[in-house]
Amino acid sequence: MHGANYRKSNGQPYARKKYIKGKPQIKIAKFQTGKMGDYDFCVQLLVNEKIQIRHMAIESTRLAANKTIEQVTGETGYYSRLRVYPHILLRENKMIATAGADRLQEGMRRAFGKAVSLAARVKQGQVIYEAHVKKEHLEHTKKALKSACVKLPGTPTIKVIPLK
């Protein structure tokens, strides 16, 4: 299964987890990191298109951004927050591709699919991740978010909002 197969969001989202046995676990470890406090700027990561982002991509973006910001500011020198939650179940109807599989497969008959991953549907211009930093760490934070953008599908942008 590739992430490109689930990038476009077509149809209704499926979020009814009570009907599915063996639900995939969410890979995101923390949604808020750092210390809340009095900061000068809020640096945001926005998405430019309507897209679905899988939970592994969200977590790898968060890890990449937090690791590089933390190297300069320290653990308590910033506050970061994920603004999306992956609650949509992605299902896959796996087909057998071996000799004699034609007697085992049902094709599209009863093709509900097995839950394989979780995703978050985001709208155009929606904020995915934000980091609050002091003025002296602003350029480094922008560079950290630019390197974390690579892990997301589509073309995200970075927006800086002064808090004072």
Image (cartoon, grey):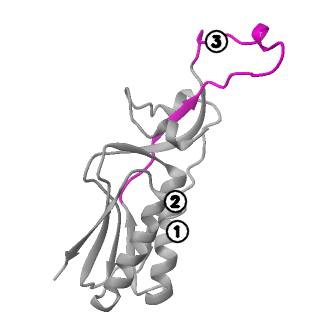
Report the residue marked by disc 2: 59
Left or right: 17 with respect to 46?
A: right
Residue drawn at (46%, 89%) of the image? 72
The percent position of residue 110, horizontal first and vertical second, equals: 59, 12
- Secondary structure under tag 3 reads loop
Q: In this picture, which residue range is highlighted in magenta?
A: 83-111
First reached walking from the N terminus: tag 1 or tag 3: 1
- Secondary structure under tag 2 reads helix
Q: Are marks 1 and 2 in contact (CB under 8 Å)?
A: yes
Indicate the amino acid at tag 1: Leu
Give 100 or 70, whichever is nearer the viewer: 100
- Secondary structure under tag 1 reads helix
* 2, above or below 28, in the image: above
Alpha carbon distance from label 1 to label 2: 6 Å
Alpha carbon distance from label 1 to label 3: 40 Å
Q: Pointer 3: residues within 10 angstroms few (<14), some, or many (20+)?
A: few
Can residue 52 be found in the magenta stretch?
no
First reached walking from the N terminus: tag 2 or tag 3: 2
In the orientation shown, which residue stands out farthest toward the bottom?
A: 136
Indicate the amino acid at tag 3: Gly
Quarter holding the N terminus is: top right
Indicate the amino acid at tag 2: Glu
